[in-house]
Amino acid sequence: MAKKSAIERNKRRKKLVARFADRRAALLAQAKSQDLPVEERFQARLKLAKLPRNSAKVRVRNRCAVTGRSRGYHRRFDMSRVMLRELASDGLIPGMVKSSW
């Protein structure tokens, strides 16, 4: 189980990302636009830099929904490999069967 503080920090980051997503996307589009003058693009980059760092999507860490483990994460199931195997063995994931031969 991951530290509670790490899990909560990640939740706060997800909230910030959702709150600033539209503003960040608009500023980024403005900064990348070749139609605008260089000064306006530079001002957009400065405004983008003033936004909170934790509002960037890359700051969010993928974590297991069950345990909070950050390593061995499967996006399709939103959980770590450890919990995926355990739940699949118990038959709690529909359609997934542990193979044996």
Image (cartoon, helix red, strand yellow):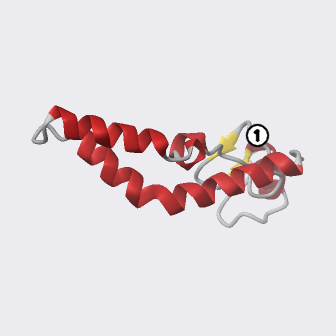
Residue 62: horizontal and vertical position, in percent? 65, 45
Residue 69: horizontal and vertical position, in percent? 79, 44
Query: At 56% across and 46% down in the image, what residue appears?
Result: 52
**Residue that lies at the very extreme toward the left in this rendered image:** 35
Q: Is residue 62 visible?
A: yes
Horizontal arrangement in the rendering, residue 97 relative to residue 33 (left or right): right
Query: At 78% across and 66% down in the image, what residue appears?
Result: 92
**Relative to 54, is 19 above or below?**
below
**Relative to 12, is 34 above or below?**
above
Quarter of the figure with residue 87: bottom right
> Badge 1: few (under 14), some or many (20 or more) residues near its Cα, within 10 Å?
few
Query: At 80% across and 46% down in the image, what residue appears?
Result: 6
Q: What's the residue type where badge 1 is placed?
A: Trp
Horizontal arrangement in the rendering, residue 60 relative to residue 50 (left or right): right
Residue nearest the viewer, comparing 66 with 86:
66
Residue nearest the viewer, comparing 81 with 40:
40
Q: Name the residue carrying label 1.
A: 101
Residue nearest the viewer, comparing 48 with 70:
48
Residue 43: horizontal and vertical position, in percent? 30, 40
Residue 75: horizontal and vertical position, in percent? 59, 49
Q: Is residue 32 visible?
A: no
Horizontal arrangement in the rendering, residue 49 relative to residue 84 (left or right): left
Quarter of the figure with residue 58: top right
